[in-house]
Image (cartoon, helix red, strand yellow):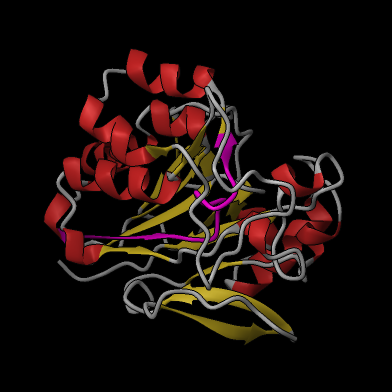
Amino acid sequence: MILPSPTTSFEWVGIDGVPGLVCRPLEPFAPHLFTTRHWRLGSRTLESDDTERWNEVAAALEVDERRLVRVRQVHGAEMAIARGGVAIRQDADIIVSDDPAFALAIRVADCVPLLIADRRTGAVAAAHAGWRGLAGRVPAAAVDALARECGSRVEDLVAAAGPSIGACCYEVGPDVREGFTLAGFSRKELDEWFVNAPVPTSRNPSMPGLEAKGRPGRWFFDGWACTRGQLIAAGVRSAQIFLAEICTASHPGALCSYRRDGAPAGRLAGAIKSVRRRP
């Protein structure tokens, strides 16, 4: 099985015979994983109540399937908190918890799966961020939620962003850039995150059919740089932010991509579990 090469902070591990991705610097503070299309979730379009396919993720994090907390993702920046067995908001794109009885999970098929752990308290967050979520400042909202609900200090946070679509493949129109403009991001930030032509690399080739020089009135969006920039702006230390830098659209054999495959695309999961730590 050929798997794409992530940055050196990430590694592939075998979990019950299927590959999963973990972030080495996050691993000492919170059990977590990012799945691939080889998991049951990756085989076809996932309905939000498709519990059976999530049981594999729950087992990997050693929790009962009833204790794998999920939400109905709505491409916003609302938060749910898992504590005492209850997620208090069903429509959300951020979940936080400091209860080690539960694991948190979000699903993606191109969007950024962001996992965060507090090294001091063991509190964790799982966040789903497509372009709308990034325009809505999901990374900063997740940091704020951990501080507000779990008493986290920003200097103690470690963040890991798993596979998502990269600037090698993610062509967007003026509505996307306008969304960030209206959200108040600076011209400098926009010029960094929106480029005029695809940016393929040896790790992430562009999808077939993309114009190498780009098209007028179109941009290629760098969600990885956007995620990192927002976390830094929220106070997370740069040295504690880790990006897998694997493009979902570049690797049909390993990862699910809605942009590449359309409605039949499966889903990937990002999941994390709190570990209670001594004060």
Query: Could you tell me residue 119's position as x and y percent?
Result: 23, 67
Query: Does 216 appear in magenta?
Result: no
Query: Could you tell me residue 75's position as x and y percent?
Result: 55, 29
Query: Could you tell me residue 148's position as x and y percent?
Result: 23, 36
Image side of residue 91 versus residue 276, left or right: right
- Identify the image quadrant of residue 262: top right
Quarter of the picture containing the N terminus is bottom right
User: Residue at position x 59%, y 27% from top?
Assistant: 74
Instruction: Judge by depth and name the residue closer to the eye, 112 or 226.
Output: 226
Whether 89 is drawn above or below 2: the answer is above
Whether 70 is drawn above or below 100: the answer is above
Query: Could you tell me residue 65's position as x and y percent?
Result: 69, 59
- Identify the image quadrant of residue 240: bottom left
* Residue 40 visible in the snapshot: yes
User: Residue at position x 35%, y 71% from top?
Assistant: 26
Region of the chain picked out in magenta, as a range: 156-171
Image side of residue 116 versus residue 235, left or right: right
Image side of residue 25 versus residue 63, left or right: left
Instruction: Judge by depth and name the residue closer to the eye, 136 or 157.
Output: 136
* Residue 88 visible in the snapshot: no
User: Residue at position x 58%, y 85% from top?
Assistant: 13
